[in-house]
Amino acid sequence: MIAAVVREHGGVEAIRFEERPVPPATPGHVRVRVLAAGLNHLDTWVRRGVPGHTFPLPLVLGSDGAGVIDAIGEGVTSCKPGDEVVVFPGTSCGACAACLSGEDQLCREYRILGEARDGTCADFVVVPTANVAPKPARLSFPEAASFALVFSTAWSMLVRKASLRAGETVLVHAGGSGVGSASIQIGKLFGATVFATAGSPEKCAKSKALGADEAIDYRADDFADAVRRLTGKRGVDVVVEHIGGATFDKSLRCLARGGRLVTCGATTGGKVELSLNQVFFKNLAILGNTMGSKGDLWTILRLIDAGRLHPVLARTMPLSALRDAHRALEERSVFGKLAVEPHA
Ligand SMILES: [Zn+2]
């Protein structure tokens, strides 16, 4: 089979297309013929490398995927060859207190496909049975490969960590990003007023089409000023933060008393200055989040099936164009997700 592999960190040329043996379906696992792999910013971090973090290279890229089960390992009874499935990105032991409490991303054995074990940017991927679920019939394979990581992350941030309630206000950074486009929809689903930032008038219009009540063009307008204006100086209850150094201080200043900032990333750098006075005086909470639980993904699947949440797919490309897809992701030239098709 063909797999997109990183052997050494670097630019897009670090992505190598290699011929590999088709992996066997081991006990308790299924082999999925990947028909689409969804891309995430995580893929570009894995490719470039992160100072102070060691990835187990060589690694097949790709955390999200969808396809058809092609073989099952010994002891597998929950699915069969021919089933159309969504691949969930996080694997865990399934037996520890964290896993049994629905917080599998806290499991000590937690591994993300394409980050700590071979991922979906290949003709086939082998995953535990707990990592596949039926593909919603209304979705194409590229759409089905474009929501698990970002929707489970956004759900965990807004619903589990920030305990979002109806009537609250939320600021979502980068409405056109994967986590941003999912957060807008989940915020509206829970009855919040949602403000989204975006980098162009076109992306602002698309953010509003997804449900955002107001969109702030951060290139034309200071987003903190805009939030003050939109909330009559009160501030928002929740900020979905994944930009990091460039926005963190202002994001914190956007919060109303008792507000919660949830962060899942730092694309502009992870070092920030923090005024503790602001945190205790305004009774703020700063919450960290990585990924989300597989159990929540079943809820998200039901909501997608019912047409209440929607994957936002920008473009589908062949796996052979993965380098171009990484470039587009890094240039932020797309609104929504990119998917690649291995067998195209
Ligand atoms: Zn566990």
Image (cartoon, rainbow, N blue to C red):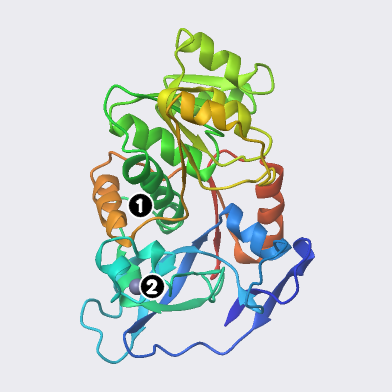
Residue wearing tag 1:
139
x, y (%) of residue 119? Answer: 53, 72
Report the front residue among 337 and 51: 51
Q: Element type at marker 1? A: loop
**Regarding ligand 1, which quadrant of the image does it lie in?**
bottom left
Between disc 2 and disc 1, whose residue precedes? Answer: 2
Which residue corresponds to mark 2? 92
Relative image position of residue 55 (x, y in whole percent): 64, 72
Q: Quadrant of residue 6?
A: bottom right
Ligand 1 is within 8 Å of the C-beta of the residue at disc 2 = yes
Taking 132 as reference, is 239 left or right?
right
- Residue 107's disc number: none
Disc 2 marks a residue whose amino acid type is Ser
As drawn, 264 above or below 234: below
The residue depicted at 51 percent of the width and 45 percent of the height is 178
Q: Amino acid at mark 1?
A: Leu
Label 2: element kind: loop
Viewer-nearest of discs 2 and 1: 2
Question: Where in the figure is residue 287, as x and y percent of width and height?
Answer: 45, 43
**What separation in Å lies between label 2 and label 1 (alpha carbons)?**
27 Å
